[in-house]
Amino acid sequence: MREEPFKQAGLDCFGVRGKSTLGENSSRGIAIAREVPITFRCLDSLLVGILHRGSEHAIRGVLVVVGGPQYRVGSHRQFVLLARRLAEAGVPVFRFDYRGMGDSEGGARTFESIEVDIRAAIDTFLEAAPGLREVIIWGLCDAASAACFYAPSDSRVVGLVMLNPWVRTEQGLATVYLKHYYFRRLVSGDFWRKIWRLEFDYTDSLRSFKGLLRKANAPREKIEEGDSEKTVSLPSRVYDALAQFQGQVLFILSGKDLTADEFRDTISASAAWRRLLRSKNIERRELPAADHTFSRRIWRDQVAEWTLAWARSW
């Protein structure tokens, strides 16, 4: 593990901007960086991460896994702001770019093939913050699903924060469009103004609607508890991973997001999913007005506060 100045990115020698990110060691009079850039190895690639120190007495930290196409800053700087809020409250945070993402080396890959990246990041996180014993993985969209796949294999992972988890299937997307997108279109003023101005394409819309109906009515894979056969669909794989995981789980779902809508529909269509989400170790929060990336400050702040309160509650 080594630390780099990252001057090429316009950062100072600590990899941070401004005095607010520095702490003063009163006994020695030494300035200590609160945010430290770290590079580390994952197989043959060099990865880049940022450590937010938090309290030196903390035993539980948060690893932020990015979803693609994304990198460690996050949409609207959400990951940076989340990490700083948690670190201010004493919770160490490590956010990083997995291989092929952001500033890290390696070829592009999907969320289904980053388990070795997550393990390398956790190893680095615990080495950089020696007091840590437990890790919560925090992920949005497909990063939430990637974290879910990884968590049962590592006893150091004691919690998951999953925002708008990705459980995309062709049938699920079609159903979501029929149930949610078209309804929102019908109550949209822009939709009716297009009809009034004769700008609405009835032929293409009808063709699209018929195609969605056909996909939505395809046979749905049934998820059963204790099913010994290997499941292949993404919702089934996410379910299996969650059922195996013994730690705490927090779901945060946006109200105005098709990805979150598809996850809700997956739950409502399956008795097994509904039973799983009633487990004592699983909690769920809803932000009805929020979009997929929690683009407004009030939504980002709420997510950060829910994350902090939940991480301290057990």
Image (tube, helix red, strand yellow):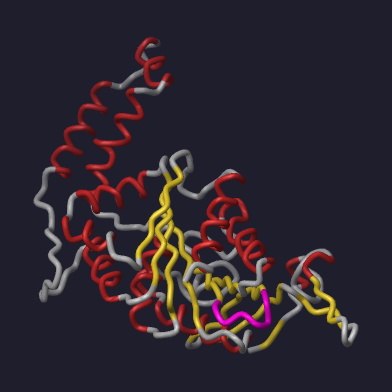
What residue sits 56% from the left and 76% below the top? Answer: 61
Main SS of the magenta segment?
loop
Q: Which quarter of the figure has residue 92?
A: bottom right
Residue in the picture at 84% in, 77% down: 24
Residue 196 image offset from top left, x and y in percent: 37, 10
- Residue at image location 57% in from the left, 67% down from the top: 102
Q: Residue at x 39, y 17 (%)?
A: 194
Q: Position of residue 74 (x, y in %)?
A: 57, 58
25 horizontally vs 126: left or right: right
* Vertical arrangement, residue 7 with respect to residue 205, above or below: below
Q: Residue furthest top?
A: 196
Q: Residue 116, position in %: x, y?
A: 42, 82
State how many labels appear: 0
In this view, which residue lies farthest toward the right?
A: 29
Question: Observer-nearest residue: 43 or 49?
Answer: 49
* Picture quadrant of residue 163: bottom left
| 190 vs 223: above or below | above
Residue 304's x, y, as percent?
57, 57
Which image quarter: residue 237?
A: bottom left
From this view, report whether residue 260 is shown above or below residue 212.
below
What segment is highlighted magenta in the picture? 54-60
- The verdict on residue 121 being magenta is no
